[in-house]
């Protein structure tokens, strides 16, 4: 069965788009909302909120609609591939969203290297007199937190792409106090397909509890980083096999959901489905569709220390957990990976995780804590080995490989 839906177009032009998908049918706001609710589409930007409910929650005068393609996550390329391959599918979804909530202004928020592509697509649509709503393109900063919902709004307003401490729902008061709908560009592309084919078609693939297809970025395998479109609920073993990994004995762990995601030990991967239900036992979710394979010869603690250090550098530094907690957490993880490990270090690490968790002005500190805690659980045997001055990765690595850890075998 061909599962390509979002990536079915043969090229990025309006002619390519219409050849593959045909014109966008007209629909009332009530029809769109009913179709989205029946389809069961959830957001593909990470949070996974039901899209129909999100559309319906926008109330008040002069609403604003924003398509979010910032994709600040270093392990993700799915939005970039979608923008390059099917920009008109995204713009169709943006127009549907604007019509449904009766938007006063419409924006598309993308990184610098995608601006030319989307502006070219918008120009094609203007020439064809295709859209009712004018789309303003806003360049997203190349930072990890720039894609967070409140950071998107703040940047579109003309400020820095940094999160703000939200006390009111964006759907009630977002951009300059107006009700605002922010959707990931993949979500909008799915909206455009549901408008054409209906909710039953959308639900014909994927996990019944969270149906459809999803774009994932697969990395860490012997193959080059790849963006794949797969049905939700696809077994993780099938996903990594697409990258050439067929023997779990070659895998130390899998990072699902990206830098704010969770590590899953290779020993637990068999039978796990890439869906919210399938990952629930690990406290994980597909997030923004990131699957990163850690080879058996690479130290999970060292890899996590590298990620936590990056996240500490990328923080907004607008609250204590971000200014002080994350740098301290990064230093402790570096000691865990490379230094002398004892009870004092482990106690300090657990204490710092507790101090940071739930206290940030945005979700960035919480996401970092989630990753760190999953690492401590998944790589518990590595922690024990490091206490003895050894590294499991060094013992497992082929002789030609240098494990990313300073401990000797």
Image (spheres, rainbow, N blue to C red):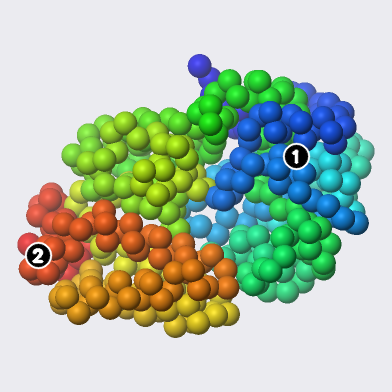
Snapshot quadrant of residue 154: bottom right
Dot 2 or dot 1, earlier in sequence? 1
Q: Which residue is mark 2?
A: 390
**Residue 401 image offset from top left, x and y in percent:** 17, 54
Q: Is residue 324 left or right of residue 16?
A: left
Q: Is residue 21 visible?
A: no
At 23% from the left edge and 37% from the top edge, which residue is drawn? Answer: 248
| Label 2 neighbour load within 10 Å: few <14, some 14-19, many 20+ | some
Q: Residue furthest top?
A: 1
Local secondary structure at mark 2: loop
Local secondary structure at mark 1: helix
| Label 1 neighbour load within 10 Å: few <14, some 14-19, many 20+ | many
Q: Which residue is mark 1?
A: 93
At 64% from the left edge and 52% from the top edge, which residue is drawn? Answer: 69
Task: Name the one closer to the observer, 195 or 178.
Answer: 178
Snapshot quadrant of residue 376: bottom left
**Residue 337 image offset from top left, x and y in percent:** 23, 69
Is residue 392 placed above or below 296 in the rendered structure? below
Q: Is residue 1 left or right of residue 126?
A: left
Q: Is residue 337 visible?
A: yes
Residue 36: assigned label: none
At 35% from the left edge and 63% from the top edge, which residue is drawn? Answer: 372
Q: Quadrant of the C terminus?
A: bottom left
At 65% from the left edge and 72% from the top edge, which residue is drawn? Answer: 164
**Residue 243 image offset from top left, x and y in percent:** 36, 36
């Amino acid at each position: 069965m061909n599962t390509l839906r979002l990536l079915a177009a043969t090229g990025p032009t309006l002619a390519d788009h219409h050849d593959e998908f045909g014109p966008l049918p007209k629909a009332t706001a009530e029809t769109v909302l009913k179709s989205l609710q029946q389809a069961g589409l959830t957001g593909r930007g990470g949070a996974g909120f039901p899209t129909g409910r999100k559309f319906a929650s926008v109330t008040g005068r002069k609403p604003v609609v924003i398509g979010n393609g910032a994709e600040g996550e270093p392990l993700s390329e799915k939005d970039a591939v979608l923008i390059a391959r099917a920009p008109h599918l995204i713009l169709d979804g943006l127009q549907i969203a604007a019509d449904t909530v009766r938007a006063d202004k419409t924006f598309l928020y993308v990184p610098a290297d995608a601006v030319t592509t989307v502006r070219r697509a918008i120009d094609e649509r203007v020439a064809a007199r295709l859209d009712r709503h004018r789309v303003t393109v806003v360049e997203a900063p190349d930072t990890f937190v720039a894609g967070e919902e409140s950071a998107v709004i703040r940047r579109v307003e003309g400020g820095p792409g940094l999160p703000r401490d939200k006390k009111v729902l964006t759907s009630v008061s977002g951009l300059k106090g107006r009700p605002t709908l922010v959707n990931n560009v993949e979500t909008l592309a799915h909206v455009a397909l549901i408008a054409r084919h209906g909710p039953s078609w959308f639900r014909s693939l994927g996990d019944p509890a969270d149906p459809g297809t999803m774009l994932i970025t697969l990395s860490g395998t012997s193959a080059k980083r790849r963006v794949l479109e797969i049905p939700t609920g696809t077994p993780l073993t099938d996903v990594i096999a697409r990258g050439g990994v067929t023997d779990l004995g070659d895998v130390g762990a899998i990072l699902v959901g990206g830098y704010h995601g969770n590590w899953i030990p290779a020993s637990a991967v068999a039978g796990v489905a890439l869906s919210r239900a399938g990952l629930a036992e690990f406290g994980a979710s597909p997030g923004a569709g990131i699957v990163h394979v850690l080879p058996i010869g690479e130290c999970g603690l060292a890899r996590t220390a590298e990620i936590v250090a990056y996240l500490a550098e990328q923080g907004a530094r607008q609250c204590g957990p971000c200014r002080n907690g994350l740098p301290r957490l990064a230093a402790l993880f570096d000691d865990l990976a490379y230094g002398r490990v004892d009870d004092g270090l482990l106690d300090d690490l657990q204490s710092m995780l507790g101090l940071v968790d739930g206290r940030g002005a945005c979700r960035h500190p919480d996401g970092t804590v989630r990753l760190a805690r999953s690492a401590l659980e998944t790589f518990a045997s590595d922690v024990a080995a490091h206490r003895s001055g050894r590294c499991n990765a060094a013992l497992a690595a082929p002789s030609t490989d240098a494990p990313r850890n300073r401990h000797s075998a």
